[in-house]
Image (cartoon, rainbow, N blue to C red):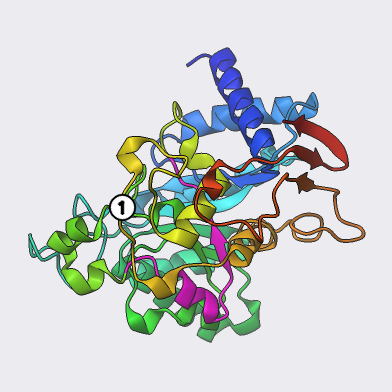
């Protein structure tokens, strides 16, 4: 792609996010595309200098090979210095710790039922410990793709070891993303260790661009118990952990998966149907997982606002309406706390204000 094409695509993204009322986003990167992402960041940096980047982008350097960790840390240090404008930051190492469940590359403790394999992960516990110490020394943060329970367990184990050794001197903010499967005994460890649990709630209806599938499909891979124990975000929330929501989507031609309101409906209902703002492929008439894992509208809003601001380290100026913070707020025709979750994915703000300025009106 030319720089002109990239900038046009970024502006398309910005226009969509302004319509949604999204004031900040974490850009999670793609392994082995570091040069491309650096081009994107350079273009966004210039856009910000021209006043054309109203949305805060928190970037990263992404790694999927243990041999690239040290190089990744050096690149994040460089990114932190080179990409530091009002609306562009980059201070996080992203590790693609494992893969996905449908293709048996997610790292799980108990083997897959149909193949007897256990997937794989990029780092073992000792490597995680070593990486965390290096990140701590450099003042950098960590974001990890962790679909299977073995992947997140390894990260939690590593954090526990380093915190035990360094105590209050350990400052790395660690976020585990997706968390499709978790061991029972790990659900409370996020709160205990201060690790952020980031879920992708539009997958919680089974499927989506990157989600795993229905209970029946997952039962063939994991057995019925694990298939009905997926995405236990409510249990982790109730444990006191900081839970945030993402809208991970790897395709650019369809913006549906980037809507926080789609995420709200998926998180609250655990299903999509004819009332939902998704295409026919994504409409699944069954709930994943069990009833007690449904989130409330208040929890969905908090996860997308103040909790997300804490993850991006901008809670001092964004994420809630308080004296002294940026005047970022949305005006809706409906009261989100009172309307039915059925079809909430169609809701859009009537007015969107960023820093006291009207940036979109429906």
Q: Which residue is mark 1?
A: 285
Up the image or down, 160 lies above or below 51; here it is below
Q: Which residues are magenta?
A: 230-249
Tell me how many marks there are. 1
Location of the C terminus (image quadrant): top right
Q: Residue visible at 42% across and 75% down?
A: 292
Up the image or down, 213 lies above or below 160; here it is above
Q: Specify whether 91 is left or right of 198.
A: right
What SS does tag 1 mark?
A: loop
Return the residue nearer the eye: 98 or 79: 98
Quarter occupied by residue 174? bottom right
Does the magenta segment cover residue 36? no
Does the magenta segment cover residue 248? yes
Q: Residue visible at 39% across and 43% down?
A: 274
Q: Residue visible at 56% across and 61% down?
A: 244
Q: Residue visible at 32% across and 54% down?
A: 206
Return the residue nearer the eye: 208 or 308: 208
Q: Neighbour class for label 1 at 10 Å: few (<14), some, many (≥20)? A: some
Residue 255, percent from left and from top: 50, 33
Return the residue nearer the eye: 39 or 166: 39
Up the image or down, 222 lies above or below 37; here it is below
Q: Specify whether 105 is left or right of 240.
A: left
């Amino acid at each position: 792609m030319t720089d002109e094409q990239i900038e046009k695509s970024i502006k398309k993204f910005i226009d969509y996010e302004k319509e949604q009322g999204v004031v900040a986003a974490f850009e999670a990167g793609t392994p082995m595309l570091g040069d491309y992402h650096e081009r994107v960041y350079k273009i966004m940096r210039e856009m910000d200098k021209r006043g054309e980047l109203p949305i805060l982008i928190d970037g990263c350097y992404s790694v999927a090979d243990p041999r690239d960790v040290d190089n990744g840390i050096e690149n994040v240090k460089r990114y932190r210095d080179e990409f530091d404008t009002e609306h562009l930051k980059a201070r996080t190492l992203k590790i693609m710790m494992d893969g996905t469940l449908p293709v048996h590359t997610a790292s799980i403790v108990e083997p897959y039922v149909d193949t007897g394999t256990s997937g794989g992960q990029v780092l073992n516990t000792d490597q995680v410990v070593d990486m965390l110490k290096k990140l701590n020394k450099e003042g950098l943060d960590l974001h990890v793709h962790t679909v299977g329970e073995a992947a997140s367990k390894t990260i939690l184990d590593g954090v526990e070891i380093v915190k035990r050794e360094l105590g209050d001197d350990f400052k790395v903010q660690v976020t585990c993303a997706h968390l499709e499967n978790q061991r029972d005994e790990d659900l409370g460890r996020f709160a205990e260790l201060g690790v952020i649990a980031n879920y992708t709630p539009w997958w919680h209806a089974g499927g989506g661009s990157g989600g795993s599938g229905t209970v029946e499909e997952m039962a063939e891979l994991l057995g019925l118990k694990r298939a009905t124990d997926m995405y236990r975000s409510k249990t982790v929330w109730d444990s006191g952990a900081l839970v945030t929501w993402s809208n991970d989507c790897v395709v650019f031609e369809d913006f549906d998966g980037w809507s926080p309101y789609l995420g709200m409906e998926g998180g609250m209902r655990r299903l999509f149907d004819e009332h939902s703002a998704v295409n026919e492929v994504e409409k699944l008439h069954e709930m994943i997982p069990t009833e007690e894992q449904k989130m409330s509208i208040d929890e969905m809003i908090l996860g997308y606002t103040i909790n997300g601001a804490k993850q991006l380290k901008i809670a001092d100026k964004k994420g809630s309406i308080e004296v002294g913070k940026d005047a970022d707020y949305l005006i809706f025709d409906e009261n989100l706390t009172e309307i039915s979750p059925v079809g909430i994915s169609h809701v859009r703000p009537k007015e969107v204000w960023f820093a006291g300025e009207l940036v979109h009106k429906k």
